[in-house]
Image (cartoon, helix red, strand yellow):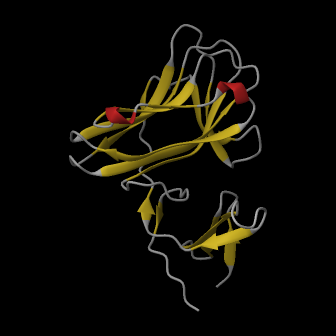
Amino acid sequence: MALIKEPYGLVRNTDGTLCTTYRDDDVPFRGVRSFAVEEATTNLFQPPFGGGWTGLWNLFITDPTGRFSKVHKANPRPNAPNYFYKDITTTVGTAFSFQAWCYVSPDYDGASAYLRGERSFSSMGNIYYNLSKKGTWQFLKAENIVATTTSGQFLLYHSAFSQGYVLFANVQIEQKPFCTSYVEESRSKGRLVI
């Protein structure tokens, strides 16, 4: 069976099943590509979405920076902040994680862009993009977010702005206390055979 390399770090078998995840090493061998067999997970950040995004967000579009295959782009809204969110049904006491890559264009004139948890996940607070580094991709994450009710929301959020744009990529919500490598839908339990 042949392998198919995806542009966002996954290697699949020709039948579509996930084989492994690959990524750049930071430690100990910077610049070396590593392969990982990871535990099973499901990315809960899937349509349908809610919020004031209609017409103000372009979802699943080609990344204008060229780094990711698909992104969610926030367009200018000068008079108010905007967001879109994913509702999650939870069990009290269950831990979740939330991650995304965020990019703010150099000409962005808004005050913030961030990840946010609400309802069951309000203890998460806001995870902000560092605006002193506009024009770069930044990895934002929140881990061990324990559900306090049976319904919660995870939001991609930005303040009011009149020029520039905000991008979010590889958004992932997992029912785990820690983040794992991005997967589009689900990753089955890894198995390494030598």
In this rendered view, identify the residue nearer to me: 187 or 33.
33
Residue 61 visible at all = yes
Q: Residue furthest top?
A: 79
Picture coordinates of residue 103, whole percent (x, y): 67, 34
Q: Quadrant of residue 122?
A: top left
Picture coordinates of residue 177, whole percent (x, y): 38, 54
> Looking at the image, which residue is at 54% across and 84% down?
192
> Looking at the image, which residue is at 56% across and 71% down?
16
Could you tell me how many numbered marks the image carries? 0
Residue 45 visible at all = no
> Looking at the image, which residue is at 67% across and 77% down?
3
76 lies above or below 31? above
In this rendered view, identify the residue nearer to me: 167 or 60.
167
Picture coordinates of residue 91, whole percent (x, y): 22, 49
Left or right, 125 with reference to 147? right
Q: Quadrant of the C terminus?
A: bottom right
Picture coordinates of residue 13, whole percent (x, y): 61, 76
> Looking at the image, which residue is at 71% across and 66% down?
28
101 lies above or below 42? above
Q: Residue furthest bottom?
A: 194
Q: Quadrant of residue 8?
A: bottom right
